[in-house]
Every structure is written in C-alpha cells, then in structure tokens.
Amino acid sequence: MEYAIECIDLHKSFGRHQIHKGIDLKIVKGAITYIIGPSGTGKSVLLKQLCGLMPPTKGRVLVNGRDLTQMKQSELTEMRKKFGILFQNAALFDSMNVFENVAFPLREHTKLSKGEISKIVSEKLRLVGLRDVEQKMPSELSGGMRKRVGLARAIALEPEIILYDEPTTGLDPIMCDAVDNLINDTQKELGITSIVISHDIESTLKIADYIAMLYDGKVVLYGTPEEFKTTENPYVRQFFSASKEGPINII
Amino acid sequence: MNKFLSLLGAPFLNFIDITGQMSVLFFTTLRLIFKKPFRTRLLLKQIEFIGANSLSVIVLTGSFTGMVFAFQSYIGFHKFGADQLVGTVVALGMARELGPVLSSIMVAARAGSAITAEIGTMKVTEQVDALNALAVDPVHYLFVPRILAGFIVMPMLNAIAVFCGIVGGAVVGVKVLGINKTLYMQYMYTYIELDDFINGMIKSFVFGGLVTLVGCYKGYMTRGGAEGVGRATTESVVLACILILVFDYILTAFMF
C-alpha cells in the first residue's frame, strides 16, 4: 500500500505539557482517514504537524517519502501547495471579501486570467453550496457559511491532500450531510487523500476508509470502520457510546 | 541566591531573545523585498495608511512643536539680547532632532499600533497559519509591504513636520514675540546647512523601518486571543518609542 503521509514516533510538547507521546500513523494515499478522539487530545496540533505548520518536538513526518522536519522553509512552502487545509474556524482573511478569499491561492500561484479565476471561484463556491455571496465580507457570514468558503478556498488549487479540521462542527444536519458528501465526492472523483478530524461518529463510520483514535498522546486504535464497529477496545467503546464509565478521564 | 540570579538573568535572556528574533526577521524581510512577486497594490495601500493618513497628525505635531519651541528658546535668548537667534535654534532643533523623533513617535502610536493589532488578530484567528497553508510566506506577504512603506514614507513625513515646525516657529517669533522678520530669516539662512536636514532625513529613514518592524514583529509574536492582541499593541508602541530614542542617540553620536 502507498502512503501519502507517515508519522514516525511523533512527540510534541508545549513547555512541560506533553501532547503527543509517540504517535505512529500512516495515511493511505487516495483514501479518507478520520482522526477521532476526545477534545484536548491534540488532534488539531497533529494536523498542523502533518503539513509542517508546526514542527514536532521529536520524531519524523514523511510526506510522499520526504521528511518535513529536515526541509528548509522555502521547500516547506513549496510542499504546502500540495495541501488544502480547512481550519476549525475557517480562518478566512477578514480584510478580503469571499471572492478574493477563494481567488487568493489562484492569484498567488497560478497565471490564470481574471475570467478563468472568476470561473473557478464560482465553480468552487457552487460545489460547497454557496451562491450570491461573492461580494460579502467574512464578518457578514454565518459560521457554517464561513466554513464552506474556507473549504472552497482549500480546494481551489486542487490539492493532493486535504486536511479538514472539524468540517461539520457547527453546521445544521442537512449541511453536515452535504459536507460529508463533498468530502466523499472530492476523494472519489479526484483521488485526493483526505484527513478529517471529527467528533461526528455517524459520519465517521459512514465515510471513512480508515479511522485512527487518539487518546492521551497516542493512537489507541487504527483500523477500518468495520473493525471499529466490532472492536472490544474499551476506549473506542466508551467514546462511541458516549458513556461516562470507562478508561477515558472526563475532567 | 538562585532566585536573585534568575531575577537578573530572565530579563537579560529575554532581551537577547527579542533582539535576535527581530534581527532575523529584519534581514529576512530585507532579502524578501527583492523577491517576486512584488505586491505593488499592498505597498501602495500601506503607503496610504502609514503616510497619507498620518498627515494631519504630523502637521499638527510639527507646527505646535515649532511654536512652543520658539516661545521657550526666546526666554533664554532674550536674556542676553540675541532674540534673532530663535529662528536658527528652532530650525536646527526641528531638522536634526524634534522633527524625526516626534514624527516617528506619532507614527508609532498611530500606525505601528494598528499594524500590530492587525497582524496580531490575524495570528490569533489562524489567518497567518492560513497564509502558510496556502503556501504564501507571511513575512513576504505581511512584513515586506509594511516595512518598505515605513522606509519610504517616514522621511517624507519628517520633511513635512520640519517644514511645519519652522513655519510655526517663525509665525510665533515674528508675529507674537515681535522679533525682526528680516533678522530672523537672515540668521536662519546663515547658520542652517543642508547637512542638518540630511541628518534628520537619515534618522527618520531608520525610524520608519524601526517602527514598522516592531509593529510587524509584535503582531507576529502575538498569542492568547483578544487579550494577547491588546497586550501586543501596547508593547509595540512602548518598544517602538524606546527604540526610537535609543537609536536617536546612537545615530546622533555617530553623525556628530
């Protein structure tokens, strides 16, 4: 099997606070991998390390076999063009309107004409289910709409790998389903590698090809949705049943 | 003893840390100025923001400083009947010292703080991460236009401040204090040289870079939400003002 990203013995700490205590994870190329786990287990931090936005304290991250931690800044920047990232709060540029936000990566990295750019922008916005918002500022949008604009921006350059940081949190059930389908479709149509951070167990089991569960700085279980449905792993069972009883500490 | 040493060492280490980080960022920015793409639109926007929008503040600061300076120096010169020297002293002081220092302190308060607040907000809302994620170097995108604009705009603002100061001083000297107009002008022309103005221009050029660099740096290092942005903004103005005064001494001693 071919891997898009490999984490080898990844450690991350902030000051004395240890977040990751040796994560080994292989992301299969062209598949959808969900990373689940309770809040505060460092899922977003892991995501940022996967694309080189944050250096790990110890360990290695290989993208297409190349070690991120050994790269120079300029190489990292170049490499990031392969990534599309949807941030938890969308992280839209609030000095630009929706159109300029989605057009930003196209203007920066391609030599497309104005007409072509505006065509791609409206196509991407339509893909995420938005219409007539191009001239609006991010502050005028609802949280869910912002997230979709962020997604349109992330897929504008048609990346090889898309990282979704909680794409459905804060969306209504219909939109959740639409985003789930979008993740599914982009992967099936373009063969994109997708990594999704989620709390939504239902969509995780429905869409994921592989699931990794994070707890206490380690991967407690990695497998297919089938394996997750039948596993006796106490962490997974507790998380899936949303029960207070079990090995996961609720503080 | 340990506690005492750490009390002494922590600020020192902090100082080295900040100096190092700022120098690295400054030289990175200098190198990136010549790297494509050139974002002319962003540069013009910053020139407008730091320069054109500071105009009224600079005109007011310059004229009032010159006016007050004329009054104060008159007190001294009048004692030994050298009233006509007021113009010389006002022009000299404005050109060499007060023009560059006060105008850049005003720009630090007005534009430097805004730069920190803007970049700081971008930092805490992950917009800087988003730039990185979209393979755009934040230093190239955010620092270069601002610092370049600072270098370009500050000498111009200084020229305006100095001009307003000299005019303000002359108005007070001649109209209010009743110094002979011809003598006032004569003494000013005789004793002021082009070097005095160039001196101030060099200073303001350095200060312009300093104020925008501090603004960018403090914004870029912001962490901790809205509170962090507030803290960074205050620190930015304080640090910029202190650095202006320190560099003012160094430059003055150097060009003396």
Image: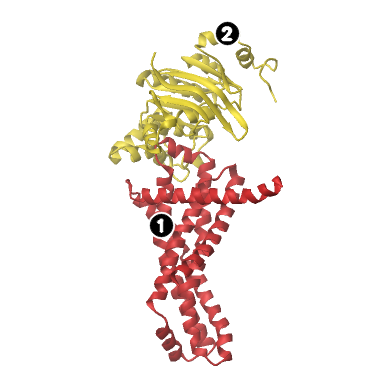
Chain colours: A yellow, B red
Q: Are marks 2 and 1 in contact (CB under 8 Å)?
A: no
In the rendered image, is residue B57 in sight? no
**x%, y% of residue A54?**
49, 34
A194 w.r.t. B102: above or below: above
Q: Neighbour class for label 2 at 10 Å: few (<14), some, many (≥20)?
A: some
Q: Chain of mark 1?
A: B
- Look at 49% across and 19% down and name the residue there: A25
Taking the spot 47% from the left edge, 26% from the top edge, the residue there is: A60
Q: Separation of disc 2 and disc 1 at Cα?
A: 61 Å
Letter of the chain that mark 2 sits on in the rendering:
A
Q: Amino acid at mark 2?
A: Thr
Q: Nearer the viewer, residue B8 or A87?
A: B8
Which amino acid is tagged 1? Ala
Secondary element type, mark 1: helix
As drawn, the label of residue A231 is 2
In the rendered view, tell whether residue B79 sits above or below residue A224: below
Q: Residues within 10 Å of mark 1 (few under 14, many from 20)?
A: many
Left or right? Give the position of B84 relative to A81.
right
Q: Mark 1 = which residue?
A: B149
| Left or right position of B66 against B4 | left
- Rendered residue at 62%/17% (across/down): A239
Element type at mark 2: loop
Q: Position of residue B226 (x, y in %)?
A: 59, 45
Residue A98 placement: quadrant: top left
Q: Quadrant of residue B198?
A: bottom left
Looking at the figure, which quarter contains the C terminus of chain B?
bottom left
Identity of the residue drawn at 44% across and 65% down: B204
Q: Residue furthest front?
A: B1
